[in-house]
Amino acid sequence: MHYHQEAAAESWGYYAAAPPAAGVRHGISMGGADPLERVVRLASGSAVVIFSMSTCCMCHAVKRLFCGMGVNPTVYELDQDPRGKEIERALIRLLGNSPPVPVVFIGGKLVGAMDRVMASHINGTLVPLLKEAGALWL
């Protein structure tokens, strides 16, 4: 997993600093952007992106699901990002009544919260999505 956060408290895998509140990362300006636009940009940055909270058990479960399938998701821990609350509010606007985390994007497209991810996994549509996005090769 690729974590994007200021400080890594636990050792899951690869850790990197969060995108700066103002500045440029991979040629994309993040400064002053609407939080919803920022979510879209971050979600498009990797084949699988998970917006998470480090203390959320459902977030942990969805991360374990993807790792168990051999997928290496990019994870944004909102509770460890200085602009995490803004992103959380944008996710609430995007999802409606669902809990704001975990939220999964595959191939830059919103899959949804834990319920949608698990439904996709159970009904067999998750693996084709992952293959299409280039997150799985087998």
Image: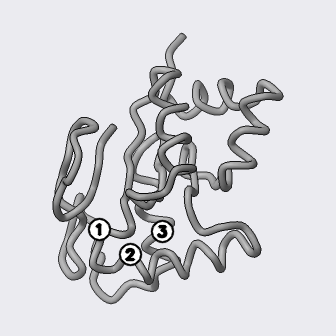
User: What is the C-alpha distance between the residues marked 3 and 1?
Assistant: 16 Å
Q: What is the quadrant of the N terminus in the image?
A: top left
Residue, far bottom: 32
* Three-letter code for the amino acid on which mark 1 is drawn: Gln
Q: Are marks 3 and 1 in contact (CB under 8 Å)?
A: no
Secondary element at image label 2: helix
Q: Which dot, 3 or 1, sits closer to the camera?
A: 1
Residue 48 x %, y %: 48, 42
Q: Which residue is drawn at 72% across and 30% down?
A: 121
Mark 2 neighbour density, 10 Å: few (under 14) some (14–19) many (20 or more)? some
Q: Which residue is drawn at 20% across and 53% down?
A: 9
- Work out whether 62 lies above or below 101: above
Q: Do the residues labelled 1 and 2 touch (CB within 8 Å)?
A: yes
Which mark identifies residue 84? Answer: 2
- Of 70 and 135, nearer the camera is 70
Q: Which dot, 3 or 2, sits closer to the camera?
A: 2
Secondary element at image label 3: helix
Residue 23 x %, y %: 18, 77
Which mark identifies residue 109? Answer: none
User: What is the C-alpha distance between the residues marked 3 and 2?
Assistant: 11 Å
The image's colour scheme reads: one colour
Question: Seen in the image, is 120 located left or right of residue 36?
Answer: right
Which mark identifies residue 39? Answer: 3
| Residue located beneath label 1 in the image | 80
Q: Earlier in the sequence, mark 3 or mark 1?
A: 3
- Work out whether 80 lies above or below 10: below
